[in-house]
Image (cartoon, grey):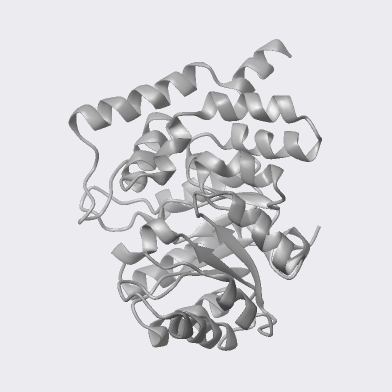
Amino acid sequence: MTIAKALWKGVYPAATTQFAADLSIDYDATQKVQTALVDDGVNGLILLGTCGENNSLEADEKRKVLAAGVEAVGGRVPLVAGVSEFTTARAIDYARDAEKLGVDALMLLPAMVYVPTTNELQAHFRAVAEATSLPIMLYNNPPAYRVNVDFDTLDALQDVPNIVAIKESAPDTRRITDVINRFADRYTVMAGLDDVAFEGLLLGASGWVSGLTSAFPEESVRLVAALDEGRIEEARDIYRWFMPLLHLDAEHDLVQSIKLAEQIMGRGSERVRMPRLPLTGARRAQVAAWVEQCAATRPCLKAAVAA
């Protein structure tokens, strides 16, 4: 299967960026995280999304992370670069550089901090798309970014050929059906919020952009595969096992929680850059307990022992 045909299918973890003790980027460790996820069967990677701490990195660091990702796993699975900038001009420059560095697609966010009007949002998306030939997935996450990629915007952008998908992270899953009913196959829909991913996939999302997959990739891959095979009960059982851990993806401290889960599972470090701080106290104990409970009862581990 070619990269183009594989886009927007299956499980795409939002890979984390790994830091050394001095909080400089540990590029080797970041590549190991990426390679391990691909080895465990994920279908693609989001580089420098929210979990990649995009907005905590300097411009040159972002380019280096993308280059390192292409070096580590380029060609094995699609690589999608998050585009999260404060201005449209910076987003254009970044998108062009990402294309030159060899990523396969972009995940485009509204401009950070400023809350745009509908016309401004449309203009931002259109300007970035026109600056690159890469396929683009728009990222709709109203709770996190205070911006809704509304139907007027999707209507207005239908003539932009490389805007082809939407990551739907609105917590109301009715939105997925409304998008599909209104636009048919014009936009591919990806489930983007972990604790409604099962519902989103049942409703027609083609894949899952996931946070907690970084800690438990095998179960995440199996959940989506089971749905593709029509094994609804198996997928539901995995989903129920995964809760309440999946709820963390909808919390303000999702990055710290996911990186702590990675560390507990031996897949990375919990280090984050300020203004984020690692979890402490009761919250850390709570998240750790959920991770350890999932680790002790893993469905894929049970299946391997039974076999």
Q: Is residue 265 visible?
A: yes
Which of 153 and 99 lies nearest the eye of the viewer? Answer: 153
Report the residue at 60% width, 64% height from top.
166
Question: Position of 212 compared to 163: left or right?
Answer: left
Q: Position of residue 46 (x, y in %)?
A: 53, 58
Q: Position of residue 94 (x, y in %)?
A: 45, 79
Quadrant for the C terminus in the image: top right
Q: From this viewpoint, which residue is outermost toward the top?
A: 306
Q: Position of residue 214 (x, y in %)?
A: 49, 42
Question: Position of 303 compared to 82: left or right?
Answer: right
Report the residue at 55% width, 42% height from top.
196
Question: Position of 306 compared to 86: left or right?
Answer: right
The relative height of residue 116 versus residue 141 in the rendered view (above or below) is: below
Q: Is residue 77 visible?
A: no
The relative height of residue 110 versus residue 233 in the rendered view (above or below) is: below
Q: How many marks?
A: 0
Question: Position of 240 compared to 26: left or right?
Answer: right
Q: Position of residue 119 (x, y in %)?
A: 47, 85
Report the residue at 44% width, 61% height from top.
48
The relative height of residue 199 versus residue 171 in the rendered view (above or below) is: above
Report the residue at 59% width, 56% height from top.
175
Quadrant for the N terminus in the image: bottom right
Which of 287 and 45 lies nearest the eye of the viewer? Answer: 287
